[in-house]
Amino acid sequence: MTTQRTSGRRKQAMAAAAVVAALLTTAACGGGGGDSDGGSKNGAAGFDAANNKIAQADLAKKGGELKFASAQDADSWDTTRGYYGFMWNFSRYYSRQLVTNTPAPGEKGAGVTPDLATDVAKVSDDGKTYTYTLRDGITWEDGKPITSKDVKYGIERVWAQDVLSGGPTYLKEVLDPEDKYQGPYKDKSADKLGLKAIETPDDKTIVFKLPQANSDFEEMLALTSASPVRQDKDTKSKYGLKPFSSGPYKFQSYNPGKDLTLVRNTEWKQESDPVRKAYPDKVTIKFFTNANELDQRLIAGDYDVDLAQTGLSPQGRTTALKQHEGNVDNPVSGYIRYAVFPQSVKPFDNIHCRKAVLYGADHVSLQTARGGPQAGGDIGTNMLPPSVPGSEGQKYDPYEMAGANKKGNVAKAKEELKACGKPNGFKTTIAVRNNKPVEVATAESLQASLKKIGITVDIDQFDGSQTAGIIGSPSNVLKKNYGIIIMGWGPDFPSVQGYGLPLWSSDYILESGNNNYALIKDKEIDGLFDKYVTTLDDAGKADISKQINHKVMEGGYYLPFVFEKFINWRSSRLANVYTSDGYSGMYDFVNLGLKSSK
């Protein structure tokens, strides 16, 4: 255990523990928050008071009902199947993992800290063996202890994709790259724990044996999909209706699409959990079908926070900024919104035709269509989000999208058209989701600016709920002549692997559910990803991330629109509020409290 990886993790864990201790002390004893500039008489903390810092930490009280509201339900509340960012965030109320994101504002929130485990992993010198010891006093909602076998079984469920599809599969791909294990429901061993890559020598010890080193493995274990599941409580495809709790809250009732209520898990022990303070007595979600009504109810004070964390609608945003500025934060989301050019659709197999679009686009107009600098975000200049190590932010701007060419450069665009053999332009189609009005507005902006350089664009609005089979099908993309696809992406975990692998690796080109829309098959990019996963020091990983981003941008595969920002609402009742890079700029739900238990 002398690798830089282990040393770095040890330092990170010590720093994380210090951060957690400081946060919990502050929350209990005072020393933060309160009204600030931009606050209001209703007790709001002030504009951006919780953006990468803690608002009203000293005012959190035990008790009360924390009220979430949302315009959409989770894809699933099953810890194996959930893939929505807000589900990963919220699920920590009822699920724990060996390690989890550090409960701290901003960049520190992307770190990893022990949860069910006593410490971060002991990692072997070759980076292939990870060993954890479980804490004392960790229990299920019925009081039975959580064991290493429960953790292993919960992870094994990821292999049951025929029954439990939908969630991230990183653990499956890293632990069983040859896909030999069939999952617990087809497991022929008596205890259904036949996955050889995970060993449980006793109830307190769990050992992961990776066939190949992967420097982000511990980040993968911090995902909800690594939560324990107790075998006798596994209801398979119905588990998401009432997961069995390992956290401070348990399901009381759930009516899909209507409401969800969590109440205290009386068997959870504070001394066994260094991460969660569990302030409220009850945590509820009300689901709305109308986003404007949702925003009105938030602003009226009927609810405390938006579960989805994707920002107020234009109508709600206007009201909030004019009348309640002290109740809003303006975080960078961690997402990049962009256009991407499938190389299967001519003439986008030619790099010069792709670059013609990059130079011809009016980047200010695209930013405005997204909501402007405050609600939309800074002009995007490359494809690595600011929250991912190796990102250079707007400093890396190879096409001067935020500089000299921000309003478009017709002359350069026409030079590229000439170079690609289309001096008079060409015709193509933009594919855009019909349930995303801001994306339609972005397509219209791009259509208008490309017309100036001779590129005629049709806009095809497709059913946004059918994305995987429409733009996720390369054969359909070719059939529909989708030369430009408008989408967005955020990191599953803050690394170039957790963000870019599905987008840029040739191994991830799929017949359905494809996200490598550009159909990138670049040996250098693939080679850099291979090098990244076996690089164990953080500085080396950041450098490779930078190189991958540069190769992607040099290929002209993407037109980034914005490094996305949101206008998010927090009620005046909320305390201990802060945004976290670990959850793409969302509020960290797990330690939200109320200023009063009433």
Image (cartoon, rainbow, N blue to C red):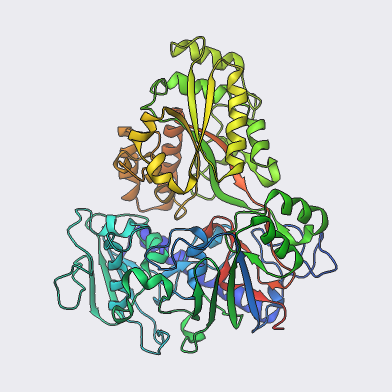
Left or right of residue 16, residue 170 in this image:
left
Q: Which is more toward the observer, 142 or 50?
A: 142
Foreground of the two, 316 or 22: 316
Residue 98 appearing in the image: no
Above or below 100: residue 426:
above
Q: Position of residue 532 (x, y in %)?
A: 35, 46
Q: Position of residue 290 (x, y in %)?
A: 63, 57
Indicate the quadrant where residue 378 lies.
Answer: top right
Q: Is residue 151 visible?
A: yes
Q: Which residue is most to the right?
A: 41
Left or right of residue 538, residue 597 in this image: right
Image position of 67 (left or right of 533)? right
Quarter assignment of residue 288: bottom right
Count of labels shown?
0
Horizontal side of residue 393 vs 493, given as left or right: right
Above or below 499: residue 80: below
Residue 524, image x and y in percent? 33, 33
Query: Where is the C terminus found, in terms of image quarters?
Result: bottom right
Q: Position of residue 103 (x, y in %)?
A: 55, 68
Q: Is residue 565 above or below residue 445?
A: below
